[in-house]
Image (tube, rainbow, N blue to C red):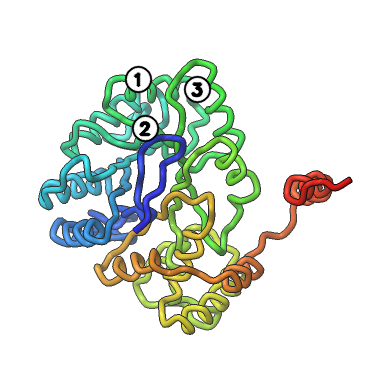
Amino acid sequence: MRYNRLGSTGLFVSELCLGTMTFGGENGTFWGQIGSLEQDEVDRLVGAALDAGINFIDTANVYSGGRSEILTGQAIRNLNVPRENIVVASKVMGQTGTGGVNSSGLSRFHIMESVKASLKRMNLDHLDLYQVHGFDPATPIEETLRALDTLVQHGHVRYIGVSNWAAWQIMKALGISERHGLARFESLQAYYTIAGRDLEREIVPLLRSEGLGLMVWSPLAGGLLSGKFARDKQGEEGNRRTAFDFPPVNRERAFDCVDAMRAIAEARKVSVAQIALAWLLHQPAVTTVIIGAKRIEQLRDNIGAAAIELADDELAALAQVSALPAEYPGWMLERQGDARRRLLTEGTRD
């Protein structure tokens, strides 16, 4: 297991992060479709992740109505994990509590109430990373950042991050933080897969320019890249994609990627899912890939991706089959900047 620096901080996190979306969902509910693991099963998954070298756990206050945080915190205690050996992340924005008008969003009110509730559910005195879970059009970005800065100053939160924002929104937030001397976003949690490389158009260049870490959610596109699906095969009964078809994916491109990954997986005698995860781990912008599981065997298979070193020809084949179609202004930037770009790589001669 490799460890990467989170953004521009001095904090190091494992290249794989244990996601907790499958913890605590009740059967017959939205969250139950994703996962309904109870404490004994959660303890086994968390223990296996820690044994493999994973030191990073990601949850959210809305997962299973808060039960995911409760089960995660209890697992940390049940396994006697030293607090300094684990990095714990949670999120804020979604509807909580009784559903009152101020029980969602990124207002100072909701952030302050939510962090107290999350810490209580997890029985922790601080969160290592606190992330805004989406963009709130009703709250000024500066209000959100000042509230998060207060949490950092008071020691309730060590670092702050963002999830599911556009590049312009992230850049605006970074500018506000710099201008006012506030804690800044150090990471972005975003959807990114070999079959969904949209992030590379605007957001990846931003992350690399400004020194933010990238945490990847749904690296298997909700199971579509697990190898259980193909053009002529819709997957096992009960698969998450069958019950909950998310995130949206261009299926033709996805199945082209699956076909290419399957050939590599069969040659290496590994799973298609491992190749999909290994591809992400080879992308320079990626800090950590969040993996979630319902079964210990699934988790161990995912963890195996960390040991796979893809060859240059394999990476080239996967890059070709998954390439994004050209869009403006990208193709114009590429065309106009080509000569100057070559000066940087090739130098000049008299």
Q: Is residue 348 above or below residue 263?
A: above
Q: Which mark is residue 110?
A: none
Q: Position of residue 100 (x, y in %)?
A: 33, 30
Task: Spot the residue most to the top.
Answer: 180
The answer to the question of whether label 2 and label 3 lie on touching residues, with beta carbons closer than 8 A, is no
Q: Callout 3, which amino acid?
A: Ser
Label 1: how many residues lie within 10 Å, few (<14), some (14-19) or many (20+)? some
Q: How many marks?
A: 3
Q: Is residue 177 visible?
A: yes
Mark 1 and mark 3 lie on one chain; the one further toward the N terminus is: 1
Residue at 48%, 81% in the rendered image? 233
Residue at 58%, 31% in the rendered image? 171
Residue marked by disc 3: 177
Q: Is residue 287 above or below residue 33?
A: above
Question: Seen in the image, is 144 located left or right of residue 62?
Answer: right
Q: Callout 2, which amino acid?
A: Tyr
Residue marked by disc 2: 159
**Judging from the image, what secondary structure is the residue with disc 1 in?**
helix
Q: Position of residue 124 (x, y in %)?
A: 18, 35
Residue marked by disc 1: 150
Label 3: how many residues lie within 10 Å, few (<14), some (14-19) or many (20+)? some
Specify the quadrant of the image occupied by residue 187.
Answer: top left
Give the CA distance from mark 1 to mark 2: 11 Å
Q: Is residue 23 above or below residue 177?
A: below
Q: Is residue 29 above or below residue 208?
A: below
Residue situated in front as seen by the camera: 80 or 246: 80
Specify the quadrant of the image occupied by residue 196.
Answer: bottom right
Question: Seen in the image, is 245 located left or right of residue 296?
Answer: right
Mark 1 and mark 2 lie on one chain; the one further toward the N terminus is: 1
Mark 2 and mark 3 lie on one chain; the one further toward the N terminus is: 2
**Judging from the image, what secondary structure is the residue with disc 3 in?**
helix
